[in-house]
Image (cartoon, rainbow, N blue to C red):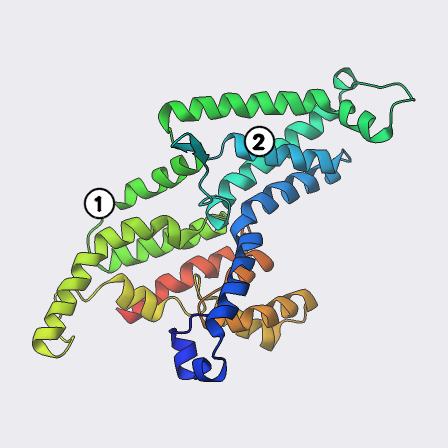
Amino acid sequence: LSPDGFIAKILFLGKIFPNLADAQAVFSPVMQGSTNIMAILIVFLVARNLAIFFKQDDLLCGLTSIGAFFIVYTPYTVVDNASYMTIKFLGAQGLFVAIIVAIITGEVFSRLARSPRLMIKMPDQVPPAVARSFKVLIPVIIITILFSVINYLITLIAPEGLNDLVYTVIQAPLKDMGTNVFSVIIIGLVSNLLWVLGIHGPNTVAAIRDTIFTEPNLDNLSYVAQHGSAWGAPYPATWAGLNDGFANYGGSGMTLGLLIAIFIASRRADYRDIAKLSLAPGIFNINEPVIFGLPIVLNPIMVIPFIITPAINTLIGY
């Protein structure tokens, strides 16, 4: 919560809590241990639950999946003989790759671990924890080699790694769109569809969105400064004017309406609990708790209104 932010100003939080900046410094790093490492948590949990489903060693499967994720992660950057790794794809932006890696690891691990030929059986005198590790050592080695080969092949066409390749492929078709209502709708549809796949949609299309709409926004601003009104502005269809103004209530997919519907009609206790936790951040267009809590990600039913409703509202706003 910024001391100079909108909420702090209207609620006079700076006067009520003079040490608000210190509190921000204390609590802001919480994100580094939660949402900013979401991809690591997801890659572990998805692979682990797959192993549980197949009745295999879930802990070692989850740990193997984390290793596989970092094998195909964005390469290290060396500066002054020191290696640095970007944390850009450890959060929501890396979820798509994390889910794919976890599914592949969970499926391959579970099938290989069932094969008696690939099991290493240790003598009874060996401690159980050590014997457990050796039992699935060969599947772990095979998965590690598999992802190493995949990573090598990927770096031949995308030196920055798999995550960067995914975002480049998604962004490329959007670059040549003009400034009109259809470009707003298409970018919005792509952004929301990416959320459904576990990819941070707004961050993915941000560069393309800014490229298309920054200059028209400046032209509109200049027009307003000269004429004192936005009526007759040269570019009536911009992202900020249409999407932010009409199609983003509660965040991507307009999930504020979904929360209200849950409070009114839903009898599911888990939905109502998530709605209670999500209402306050949803008012400020923060809806990751809804997207990943219900979830909307990979949900074939909720994906329909999540994608279509903002497009309809954009047309209404236009």
| Residue nearer the viewer, 126 or 84 | 84
Label 2 crowd (10 A; few <14 / some 14-19 / many >=20): many
Residue 210 percent location from the top left of the image: 26, 54
Residue type of the residue flagged with mark 1: Asp
Q: Spatial distance from mark 2 to mark 1, Cα to Cα?
A: 35 Å
Q: Does residue 131 appear in this view?
A: yes
Label 1 crowd (10 A; few <14 / some 14-19 / many >=20): few
Furthest residue toward right: 124
Q: Which mark is residue 68?
A: 2
* Relative height, residue 80 to residue 301 (above, below): above
Residue type of the residue flagged with mark 2: Ala
User: Tag 1 or tag 2, which sits nearer the N-term?
Assistant: 2
Label 1 SS: loop
For disc 1, the marked residue is 176
Figure quadrant of the C terminus: bottom left
Name the residue at 46% across, 52% down: 195
Q: Is residue 54 left or right of residue 250?
A: right
Q: Is residue 184 left or right of residue 2?
A: left
Residue 247 percent location from the top left of the image: 37, 66
Residue 241 percent location from the top left of the image: 26, 68
| Residue nearer the viewer, 290 or 41 | 41
Quarter-of-image position of residue 175: top left
